Amino acid sequence: MFQKKIEIGDWIMQDKEQSTPSVIVQRDKDELAKGYPKWFRFLETIGLILFFILVAIIAIRISIVANELWYFILPSLILGWIFSDFIGGLVHWAGDTWGSVDMPILGPALIRPFREHHVDPYAITRHDFIETNAACALAGVPILFSCLFLKMGKEFPISSFIAFFVFFLTIFVLFTNQIHKWAHTKKKNKILIFLQNAHIILNPEHHQIHHTPPFNKYYCITTGWLNSFLNSIGFFPKFEKLIMKYTHALPRRDDIGVSAAEKEIK
């Protein structure tokens, strides 16, 4: 499955010590586009429904205690917004860097969209709401469900703040890929343009840094606020080296080809 690959001659990585260029090799975009499993779409749809049910229940619980815990709303909202950028970036990095489309179950369901996006960045603009966002909703369901067991009220400040924070975090994570989609959308309304230009949500020019081969930086796609900081401390490269040390796995092997991936880590 998905064995056909293509060479993109314009995307060249130059070896730092040699004059021989390394051509990035990627999977065929048409095969990737056809690989969206029907069973996973059904699962995503169920997850999306459960997500909004849980959000509604927690929103009602928060509204009951909001008068006495109003001072939790703004800080938990801001923290949720910031952490959603980090969580989105971490998942994006994992999907771009590890695994293969050929893996059973996880490959076509979760890894395939990451491979498709680097081959055809505008494919995401043709995805409907479910294909774009439901996987994030599905991941948020167990987290929201656990929040149902948190006690809320003035006498439970810590668990109350956690519930507020997780509520906002999961909502923002749900729309992370929608914001990512807007960064690739050509026709946008004035509100979206303003939010992107103000860097309140992911700015397209900022995100283009990630789409520069070998696609190994600026993974955060909610606001992009954390990209410069994480890049400056080498967060993801250090994480990759740690994983490579104990697993001997080659990062981005399935995304850019073995030759380019090997040269990129030297």
Image (cartoon, rainbow, N blue to C red):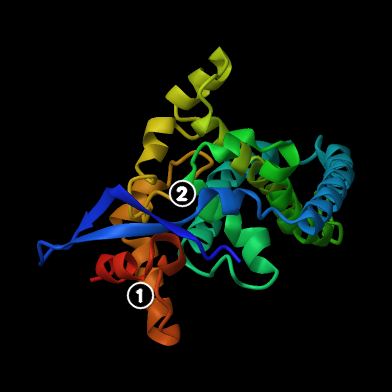
Residue 201 in view in this figure: no
Residue 150 position by quadrant: bottom right
Check the image and report above or below for 145 versus 227: below
- Looking at the image, which is closer to me, 43 or 153? 43
Name the residue type under label 2: His
Out of 96 and 18, give the one closest to the viewer: 18
Residue 114 numbered tag: none
Question: Relative to residue 185, is residue 13 drawn left or right?
Answer: left
x, y (%) of residue 131?
A: 70, 44
- Residue 119 on image: x %, y %: 46, 48
Quadrant in the picture for residue 216: bottom left
Q: CA distance from mark 2 to mark 1?
A: 23 Å
- Secondary element at image label 1: helix
Q: Residue furthest bottom?
A: 246
Residue depicted at x 29% and y 49%:
9
Relative to 59, residue 255 above or below = below
Image location (x, y in percent) of residue 210: 38, 46
How many numbered circles are shown?
2
Horizontal side, residue 75 vs residue 3: left or right: right
Residue occupying image coordinates x 81% and y 58%: 39
Q: Which of the two residues, 213 or 158, is positioned nearer the viewer here?
A: 213
Q: Which residue is mark 2?
A: 118
